[in-house]
Amino acid sequence: MILKDFLPITVVCAVLIFLLKEILDVFKKKTERQRKISAYKLLILEELRKNAWSVKHLKGVMSELSDPDLKSVEISKLSSGGLKIAIHTEGSWGSSPLWPIHTSVFEKIFIGLAETDAEIFSAVSQAYEELAEVKHVRDSLIEFSESPDHPGGWESFAEYGEDVIKDCEAAMNKLCTQITGKPLEGFKLRSYI
């Protein structure tokens, strides 16, 4: 009754409705943020799985490059626009696609992720920094294959590449563990992203 004496009932109702609306907006923003974070995690995980295959394959290439019987390495363009690597050793020859390193998802969600969750953004940035190093190894492989007498030879390049790949795999596993609670399992050649 004291409140009724000072303020009309319509003012009290308006204030209560305003407070209720503000409380609902806070919950709505919180659930919206959680949905965004879940979507970001799913997209990053998909791209990590695609990169897991590229990194695994490049690791195998580095192993082949350290073969003392290595004769030549050739890179050629496929009709699909991708690249193919052919490795010739004493008595054997093999070729396979040279898979790209994928960063398009990270590039698209970079700002939104930074605004939404600083902790996940930091972990994602570290993993993609390592992926950038692996991309550099892949790009250097392409350049060096065009010049078979590059400084240092294939064995030292392969050793360097294996070290970079090892660091990248650790960073990808750490990120996946932070996102899902377990290390990166499996890989994908293709994805909807």
Image: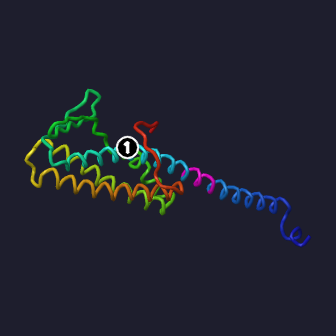
Is residue 165 rendered to the left or right of residue 120?
Answer: left
Q: Is residue 93 above or below residue 182?
A: above
Task: Please rate how many residues cluster around mark 1, counting C-alpha atoms within 10 Å: few if below 14, some from 14 to 19, many from 20.
Answer: some
Q: Residue at x 29, y 28 (%)?
A: 80
Q: Quadrant of the C terminus?
A: top left
Picture coordinates of residue 154, whole percent (x, y)? 15, 50
Q: Amino acid at mark 1?
A: Trp
Residue at the left extreme, as displayed: 149
Q: Residue at x 31, y 42 (%)?
A: 100
Is residue 122 rendered to the left or right of residue 87?
Answer: right
Q: Is residue 96 above or below residue 121?
A: above
Picture coordinates of residue 189, whole percent (x, y)? 40, 37
Picture coordinates of residue 47, whole percent (x, y)? 42, 45
Look at the image and say whether residue 57 sits in the magenta stretch. Answer: no
Question: Label 1, on which residue?
Answer: 53
Q: Which residues are magenta?
A: 30-36
Q: Count up the numbered dots.
A: 1
